[in-house]
Image (cartoon, rainbow, N blue to C red):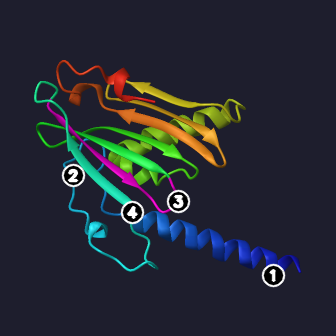
Amino acid sequence: MKSSSFTTWRVASGALLASLLLCTQAQAALGRAPQPRPADAATSATESAPVARQMRAVPASEAYTVSTIVAPTGTVVQEFVNAQQVVFAVVWQGPVLPDLAAFFGDHYVAFQRAAKERRAAGQRGGALLAQQPDLVMVSRGRMGRFQGHAYIPSLVPSGVNIQALLP
C-alpha cells in the first residue's frame, strides 16, 4: 500500500511541476527583456495556461509597465519592466510558490546560496532574505500561502519608490 501512495504522490508532484513549468517557461527573468508568451494564446481548458494575464502602463513619470499573471494554481505574479524593456522586479503571492528559477534567471544562484547558508546555520522556516548590491530578494510563506519579491536596485527607474511596489 505504501508503494501505491508513493507512486500517486510522485505522479501528482510531477503533474504540478509540469503545470508550473508550462506557465512560466516563457516568462521574462530579472535583468532580461520580456519574452513573448506563447501560453497567452487561446488554449483549451485542459492546458496549463495562465488563467489571466494583464499588462498595464503606469504614468509616464514613473516609466515602467506591469505584467500580472494569474496561474491556474491561483498564484499571482507581477513583473515590473522599465523603459529600457528590462525586468527590474518580480513580486509573487499565492498558494503555490512559482518557479523562481524562471523568474530570477541568472540571479537564481543567489537565491540558492541564501537558502543553503540558512540551512547550514540550522535555520528552518521564516523568511529567506538575500541582500546584495545587485539583488534584493525576500521569500516567505508556508504551504498554501507564499509571497515574496526580488528586484535589481540598479535597474529600478529613477524616482520610483520600490518599497511601494512590494508586498
Q: Earlier in the sequence, mark 1 or mark 4?
A: 1
Q: Secondary structure at mark 1?
A: helix
In 3D space, how far apart are the residues under numbered discs 1 and 2 (Cα atoms)? Answer: 42 Å
In 3D space, how far apart are the residues under numbered discs 3 and 4 (Cα atoms)? Answer: 9 Å
Left or right of 148? Residue 33 is left
Camera-nearest label, 3 or 1: 3
| Numbered mark located on residue 50 in the image | 4
Task: Specify the amino acid type for callout 1.
Answer: Ser
Q: Secondary structure at mark 3?
A: loop
Q: Earlier in the sequence, mark 3 or mark 1?
A: 1
| Numbered mark located on residue 32 in the image | none
Question: Which picture quadrant has residue 27?
Answer: bottom left
Mark 3 closeness class: few <14, some 14–19, many ≥20 residues within 10 Å: some
The residue segment tinted magenta is 63-74
In 3D space, how far apart are the residues under numbered discs 3 and 2 (Cα atoms)? Answer: 22 Å
Q: Earlier in the sequence, mark 2 or mark 4?
A: 2
Q: Label 3 belongs to which residue?
A: 73
Q: Label 2 belongs to which residue?
A: 34
Q: Was residue 65 drawn as part of the magenta stretch in this picture?
A: yes
Q: Earlier in the sequence, mark 3 or mark 2?
A: 2
Closer to us: 21 or 58: 58
* 137 up-or-down from 87: above or below: above
- Residue that protrudes farthest toward the right in the picture: 1
Q: Label 1 belongs to which residue?
A: 4
Camera-nearest label, 1 or 4: 4
Task: Specify the amino acid type for callout 2.
Answer: Pro
Left or right of 49? Residue 19 is right
